[in-house]
Image (cartoon, rainbow, N blue to C red):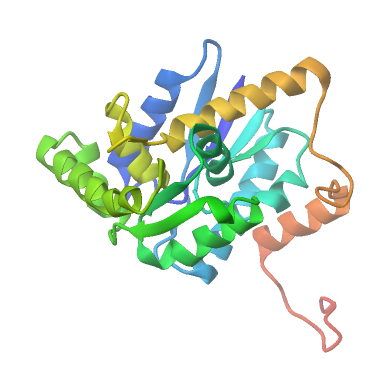
Amino acid sequence: MRIFWQSFVDASASAPYMTRLQDYLNGIAAPGVTVEVAGISPPDRDFGRLSELRCAILAIDNGLAAEDAGYDAVVMGHFQDPGLYELRASLRIPVIGTGEASFYAAAQLGRRFGLVTLDSVFETWHLEQAALYGLEHRVVGVRGLDCTPADFSDAFAGDDDAHARMCAAFAACAQPLVDAGADVVIPAGVLPGLLLSRERGLTVGRAPVINCAAVALKSAEMWVQLHRLNGIEPSRGPAFALSPARAREDFRALVARGRGPQTAGGDTAS
């Protein structure tokens, strides 16, 4: 089984994280499963909707290429899941969203949960996610670490003091959510999720902390197995109607060549 994992960070600028993530995922993967982690350049460096959309377009294109290359599943390894539904509607192989999988895993572990995200700007996005997944009434709140991917680099490079500082910052963000009634804590990002992966049975108070990286990978393995077992796919009705070949080709051409010259009517000039 081959799984393609799409990260939204730059493979060079965040090399310690990418190396750690690749090693971690392959280390916990089931026998016979390999995971390839890919980055995006420029990464999601200007937190906001336009940056998320740009990265989502590249991630969708990479997902289409991954299916053509023979991968068995694609994981959107960016918690906000931008482009998830569009990609799921375009592939015959399973497509897993890290955020979606983590929300539903948390819903099986407790009734109410809180999210600790990378930056406070993502609070609205995560609340929208919860509503999209039908879980908005179970979210106590969202708190941001207000940091960047680069802030994790020393911890992933083996600096124990940096690791301890980042863990302490996460716990400080999570505690008010637990005090407010959250009985599960979700690291709303693979960066903090991977940071905490060294901790076994981690809790904040009595609230377990989800390992979103592990949840996404194991969800991918499960859905590949189920797909192989009986051919199950997402609904191909209105929810995830399969994109026709021409739509895939038009999308990939747009990404590869850009918009190109346009006539007044919107058609490409000859």
Residue 223 location (% of width, % of height): 67, 26
Q: Is residue 25 visible?
A: yes
Q: Is residue 140 above or below residue 107?
A: below
User: What residue do we see at 60% from left, 23% from top?
Assistant: 221
Count of number-bearing discs: 0
Identify which residue is drawn at 42% across, 47% down.
189
Q: Quadrant of the C terminus?
A: bottom right
The answer to whether residue 102 is left or right of residue 171 is right
Front residue of 248 and 74: 74
Horizontal side of 120 relative to 221 (left or right) equals: left
Describe residue 147's horizontal placement relative to residue 98 as left or right.
left
Q: Quadrant of residue 25?
A: top left
Q: Where is residue 72 drawn, in percent x and y? A: 67, 27
Mark yes or no: residue 82 visible.
Answer: no
Q: Residue at x 41, y 50 (%)?
A: 114
For the N terminus, the quadrant is: top right
Q: At 52% across and 54% down in the image, what residue appears?
A: 80
Q: Nearer the viewer, residue 26 or 221?
A: 221
Furthest toward the bottom, the residue is 264
Quarter of the rendering containing residue 120: bottom left
Q: Residue furthest left?
A: 161
Horizontal side, residue 68 vs residue 243: left or right: left
Q: Could you tell me residue 210's position as x and y percent? A: 42, 36
Of residues 205 and 189, the one drawn nearer to the viewer in this rendering: 205
Image vertical order of residue 262 relative to residue 44, above or below = below
